[in-house]
Amino acid sequence: MTGKLVFLETFGCQMNDNDSLRMLSILKDLGYSRTDAPERADLIIINTCSVRGKAEHKVYSTIGRFRPLKREKPSLIIGVSGCVAQQEGERLLKRSPYLDIVFGPQNIHRLKEILSAASIGKERVVATAQSLTIDDSEYGRITPASGEKASVSIMRGCDNFCSYCIVPYTRGREVSRSSAGIIREVAALASSGVREVTLLGQNVNSYGAGGKADATFPELLRMAAGVEGIERVRFITSHPRDISEELIYLFGEEPKLCRHIHLPVQSGSDAILERMGRGYTKKEYMSKVSLFKKLYPDISVTTDMIVGFPGETEGDFKDTMDLINEVRFDNVFSFMYSPRPGTLAAGFAGQAALDVKSERLHVLQETQRGITEERNRALVGRRAEVLVEGESKARPEELSGRTSCNRIVNFQAPKALTGTLADVIITDAFPNSLRGVYQDSPSFTA
Ligand code: SAH
Ligand code: SF4
Ligand code: F3S
């Protein structure tokens, strides 16, 4: 089995990106290498997301695009993985007769047997079994996509069942990996040149909850920061209800912990938060964010917001806008509420009309664009440490990287700096990026 090509397209969140890398590592052992040209591929996998209806629909049009290729090359195997695969299972095979395999996020480690059933046994396979335990051998064999950055899944699933969210159904019950397995993976990544690691989970603050792991989340972060070669540690996502004081204070103690906290609030209205099942009030959220901002004035705070949740009134939406104006987030990822099959909120009364949702989204995004730009402009003249990722996409003569706050900075400097931390003075600010001047002498102070 050598010389085969796989075309892999990924939708959705960082967890799906991480799952795709796990698939590629399994496929590499089976003799596959990656291609950007689907028409040359022996295997096509679409790793899908179903968090909103739009993401799910994109999947069907993507699968349709590959249909003619199957006619030309009958040995081609087409597969769907990820959250739509888990949600739809058998129905996907029925709907798309040229699809060969469907496997959910908990079945990635079975890819070898799934593929051999499809190619040798000529079977159509659906693998959507979910388990309550986690086996470390399913993880820890990732080749990072870029040299300097990588992510590590520290847990799987979610037990929160926020009333709008499909993730607990597609990713299954929450279970944590052992700290030893996670740190082994971080160490292997560091020895292959990775400098920045992001610990991934739907709710990282409940890592190890119920005695299922042998460390708390702050302890795990300390361990990751202690791995030789690791210069930066990030994490995502933190649930505002579960974020502990220990974690908040860790930002003051652990210099490798990046100065960025993504704390999804979803709404500024207590009535809506209650119906979402988020487990905190606006006041409780504000007190946590205020503590962060008081202790670490340079920290970047970002969030997720949903507009047009069932029953959201003009007053509720005003509460959301008040929160946005009070906190002045560095960035907000905002979405129109999308009813998801099988979730509680899909059956709630008062589903909002599309024009109401899109108008509210527009108002929110316009306001936030101004705030993000102002907050970026306030950085002009400051010094920043940038982990250099390589040439800038828009201007190949420049390098591009990210600050500890996760802002993109473009600047001119020798290409050899790629993969290292560079000192840059910020000279210009735009809505989505910064420009800077590279400082050869690291002893420079602004
Ligand atoms: N575990 C993370 C979020 C994962 S989903 C957390 O709890 O923060 C990423 C984001 O998608 C959510 O924060 C939410 O803002 C959005 N989202 C989830 N379900 C949605 C839905 N049904 N409609 C619109 N947005 C949704
Ligand atoms: Fe979804 Fe809530 Fe779990 Fe996040 S915490 S994945 S929003 S159910
Ligand atoms: Fe991620 Fe989308 Fe699944 S956001 S967890 S890929 S539904």
Image (spheres, rainbow, N blue to C red):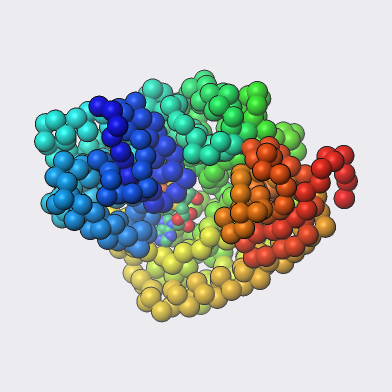
Residue 317 position (above or below residue 211): below
Residue 327 lies in quadrant: bottom right
Is residue 252 visible in this depiction of the protein?
A: yes
Q: Position of residue 252 (x, y in %)?
A: 75, 38
Q: Position of residue 251 (x, y in %)?
A: 71, 39
Total count of labels: 0
Q: Viewed as shown, does residue 136 lie left or right of 289?
A: left
Asked whether 344 or 299 is in front, the reply is 299
Q: Viewed as shown, does residue 381 lie left or right of 306?
A: right
Q: Residue at x 47, y 45 (%)?
A: 14
Quarter of the image containing the N terminus?
top left
Q: Residue at x 41, y 79 (%)?
A: 355
Q: Position of residue 330 (x, y in %)?
A: 65, 59
Q: Viewed as shown, does residue 212 lie left or right of 330?
A: left
Q: Residue at x 43, y 78 (%)?
A: 356
Q: Residue at x 39, y 68 (%)?
A: 310
Is residue 223 visible in this depiction of the protein?
A: no
Residue 212 lies in quadrant: top left
Asked whether 431 or 394 is in front, the reply is 394
Q: Position of residue 113 (x, y in %)?
A: 22, 28
Residue 224 lies in quadrant: top right
Q: Viewed as shown, does residue 325 lie left or right of 273?
A: right
